[in-house]
Image (tube, rainbow, N blue to C red):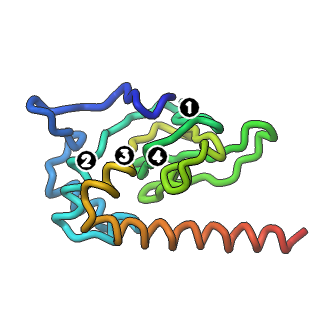
Amino acid sequence: MRDDVIRTSRRKPGGGQSTFSLDQKQLVEELSETDFFSTFTYDEIALLMFCADNISCRRDELIFREGDVGRQFFAIRKGKVKIRREKSGTVLATLGPGEVFGEMAVLDNQPRSASAIAASETELFAFDGHRLLDDFPHLSVKLLRYLARELSRRLREADMLIDKF
């Protein structure tokens, strides 16, 4: 899938994005209980939702391919996503609701390091990382702090796996 083409994005008349079938308050409350969104205040979550594209994926649908250039990162609302290396077919992680992926390409401006595939019927929020960082500096610090913590956690997990060999 190309980052700039969102097939199932649902937009309200006037240009704002919809929030699936829930009203904004319910959605923000639901999201505030997940690891990623708990970093932000109610108003900040509402702003993030305004900036997000909503994506629905079928099981086994490609979200992005290893090697693609990426401007978006994703947060999982429902379902599961597999992160897989194409050459070896190795599944690096299976992620679930509240988890974030695709952030590395946004942070380092390098091609995607792995592919992301929906492991089940999945609902995602897609964020233009550069837009959030550039246009909403008050969110940038919290966003970058969360992403740094998450990347650090993943690196520690990888170190533990390496130590097993």
Q: Is residue 92 left or right of residue 102?
A: right
Task: Please report whichever mark, 1 or 3, sits nearer to the chain's N-terminal start.
Answer: 1
The CA span between labels 4 and 1 is 14 Å
According to the picture, the residue beneath numbered tag 2 turns out to be: 51
Q: Image height check: is 105 above or below 14?
A: below
Secondary-structure class at tag 4: loop
Real-space Cα separation, disc 1 to disc 3, in angstroms: 18 Å
- Of badges 1 and 2, nearer the viewer stands 2
Coordinates of residue 58 in the picture (x, y in percent): 48, 30
**Residue at 20% over, 32% down:** 11
Circle 3 residue: 128
Measured as percent of width and height from the top left, residue 1 is found at: 51, 28
Position of residue 152 in the picture relative to residue 121 (left or right): right
Q: Secondary structure at mark 1?
A: strand
Mark 1 to mark 2 CA distance (whole Å):
22 Å
The answer to whether mark 2 and mark 3 are in CB contact below 8 A is: yes
Which residue is denoted by mark 4 in the rendering? 79
**Residue 146: which quarter of the image?**
bottom left
Residue appearing at x 50%, y 56% in the figure: 107
Q: Nearer the viewer, mark 1 or mark 3?
A: 3
